[in-house]
Image (cartoon, grey):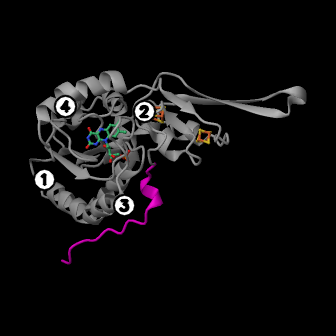
Amino acid sequence: MIFYFSATGNSKALAQELGRLLNDRVEDMVPLLYSSPREGQWLGDDKPLGFVFPIYGWSLPNIVRDFLCQLHLNDYNSRYTYFAVTCGDDVGVADRPIRVALVETGLQLNAGFSVNMPDSYICLPGFDVDKDEEREAKFARFGLRVKEIADKIVRREEVMDIKRGAFAWAKTNILGWYFRKFLITDKPFRTTADCIACGTCVKVCPMHNITLDEHQDGVNGQRSIVNITWHGHCTGCLACYHHCPTRAVRFGKRTEKKGQYLYSKYPVKLEYPLP
Ligand SMILES: Cc1cc2nc3c(=O)[nH]c(=O)nc-3n(C[C@H](O)[C@H](O)[C@H](O)COP(=O)(O)O)c2cc1C
Ligand code: SF4
Ligand code: SF4
């Protein structure tokens, strides 16, 4: 069984490809988060348990932590359990908080993998989506990397095959701590006059954190006023920003000139080595 969370599609693509190669079921964490737990139904077979998601601030996203928090999986702690994360650059020592979260659900952690994919973080100065060459280079390596990971899972390897990067401990525990505490917030979000009230941001928000109100204003109600409101329960995934068809979602003044990214916008071909 493979559970995934994904805001811009990288981790969903990874989960689906692993599911195909391992002939395993793939489930989106978000609807499960809002339904009552039914572990027995999900985990009936004896396949490995996989958790696939993006890295945020060199750690796991709060929404993934919330998903894990509601699970009680003591009966499954003999199952081979792995995580596979996607990241723009590196993961620091994210395996440590991930291990803690998994152990709290009653599981053990046997393996961890990271896959470099196009970057979705755009909120701070100096951060933007990848340029074409970098994005294409990551896509070109994607197929081989997924196959490599699937082979290791089939062999039940006990391995931590992740890209930690330089200053890994400090990234997760100091920079990442600050990032997660102060920069995972929806306060700076606003919309521009380009908003066409399509409702996409409301639909894609995994936290149900956005509402759209539209009302008529002006003489004889001839002017339509649209209010998009963020309600303070944000997991920082930026799905609302990246999915907006008119680039009307802004994170303060810092994202005016930043790009958008969605995996589904690119025709990614997965290349596998010949047997
Ligand atoms: C809030 C946020 C924080 C991020 N932090 C990191 C990070 O610490 N290290 C990294 O390499 N990439 C980071 N990224 C990039 C994502 O991990 C990467 O683009 C991922 O593949 C997105 O996955 P998705 O398409 O499944 O949502 C961050 C992205 C966001 C939105
Ligand atoms: S996705 Fe963009 S255009 Fe659509 S309602 Fe939200 S802000 Fe407006
Ligand atoms: S408000 Fe936007 S960034 Fe925050 S959780 Fe919802 S979609 Fe993600």
Residue 191's quadrant in the figure?
top right
Most extreme residue toward the bottom, as rendered? 274
x, y percentage for residue 24?
A: 31, 55
- Picture quarter with the C terminus: bottom left
Disc 3 from disc 1: Cα separation: 36 Å
Q: Is residue 37 left or right of residue 169?
A: right
Residue flagged by tag 1: what amino acid is it? Arg
Which-is-in-front pick, marks 3 and 1?
3
**Amino acid marked by disc 4:** Thr
Q: Nearer the N terminus, badge 2 or badge 3? A: 2
Q: Earlier in the sequence, mark 3 or mark 1?
A: 3
Magenta residues span 260-275
Q: Which residue is mark 3?
A: 132
- Which numbered disc covers residue 4? none
Real-space Cα separation, disc 1 to disc 2, in angstroms: 28 Å
Q: Which mark is residue 33?
A: 2
Q: CB of mark 2 within 8 Å of CB of mark 3? A: no
Label number found at residue 156: 1
Main SS, magenta region, reads loop
Ligand 2's quadrant is top right
Residue 108 x, y percent position in the rendering: 16, 36
Residue under label 4: 172
Q: Are marks 3 and 1 in contact (CB under 8 Å)?
A: no
Secondary element type, mark 2:
helix
Q: Is residue 208 above or below residue 200?
A: above
Check if mark 1's residue and mark 2's residue have beta carbons within 8 Å.
no
Q: Does the magenta portion include 274?
A: yes
Q: Position of residue 161 (x, y in %)?
A: 13, 49
Toward the left, the furthest residue is 158
Q: Check the image and report above or below for 186 versus 245.
A: above
Label 4 sits on a secondary structure element that is helix
Front residue (pair 195, 10): 195
